[in-house]
Image (tube, grey):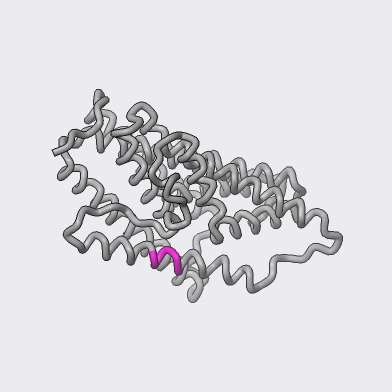
Amino acid sequence: MNFDTASASGLALMFVLGLRHGFDPDHIAMIDSIAYRSLETRPRMAPWIGTWFALGHGLTVTVIAVVFGAMAGSMVNAKPLPAALGALLEWLPVALLILVGTLNVRSLMRPAPYAAIGWKTRFVPQRLRNSSHPLAIFFIGIVFALVFDTATQAAAWGYAASMHSGIAMALLVGLVFTVGMVITDTLDGRLMVRMLRHLSGRSQAQAYRRKIGWIIVFLSYGIALYGIATHFFPALAMGETMLTLAGCALFAALLGAYLRCVRIFPFINNPPSKE
């Protein structure tokens, strides 16, 4: 990626990457879990869970990018990232996506009530997982950003941005990425909450959560297969223009689903009832 300050294309791509990162299966799984719990404990705050989560996640990514950007800038003879780190950045997300998809398929095939599974959830302390307080959700976002794959990606972005245009560019890259992710995760959280409020009982809520589970499976395997395919057949890789269009298309689909939900359920204000 070219972080030339004279061109807005790099920042535009980072914004779209932020939008797309909001569709990360781990994000969807965590937001679904918090939304379901928040409707009973903090119904007024529930529509904003995605916002608090994305703010904690994105601002931490920004700090990591700036720190590593500063480290790169302080090196007189700074060199490009090692090849081994590049390989790790390429294959670790693929392996983790396959893991998330497989865990959710196993859970969906069981007769027991389904709850979305994300591998990063295991790194979140139980006390935070059981809380629906805005600060707790913010800290969950921080934990997600500190897990190895995200932290490594953020470090690489900050390092590359600083190498080309200085620390200020590393900061700008992180903030632009954060804005994109906040937009997607906010819409995601509000859509989930509105749908769950409409459902009349636990059986309907469970059916809806299973649909979310299959979406997580589809995204996990789909993104992983794309990563594998482009590694062995580089010609299949999308350029910056196609990545931007794909990210915008995903966001447009989410926005369309939310607006349609608002039209169908315009005055849903109560948490789902228990059966």
- x, y percentage for residue 40? 29, 34
Front residue of 71 and 273: 273
Quarter occupied by residue 191: top left
Front residue of 252 and 138: 138
Image point 57% across, 69% down: which residue?
A: 88
Quadrant occupied by the C terminus: top left
Q: Is residue 267 above or below residue 127?
A: above
Image point 46% across, 51% down: which residue?
A: 125
- x, y percentage for residue 27? 42, 49
Q: Secondary structure of the magenta portion, mostly? A: helix
Image point 51% across, 67% down: which residue?
A: 92
Quadrant occupied by the N terminus: bottom right
* Horizontal side of residue 96 vs 60, given as left or right: left
- x, y percentage for residue 184? 44, 41
Per the rendered image, the range of residues in magenta is: 95-99
* Horizontal side of residue 192 vs 136, given as left or right: left
Say if the magenta span includes residue 68: no
- x, y percentage for residue 113? 21, 53
Image point 38% across, 44% down: which residue?
A: 130
Q: Of all residues shown, which one is farthest toward the bottom?
A: 232
* Horizontal side of residue 129 vs 163, given as left or right: left
From this viewpoint, is residue 260 visible? no
From this viewpoint, is residue 190 visible? yes
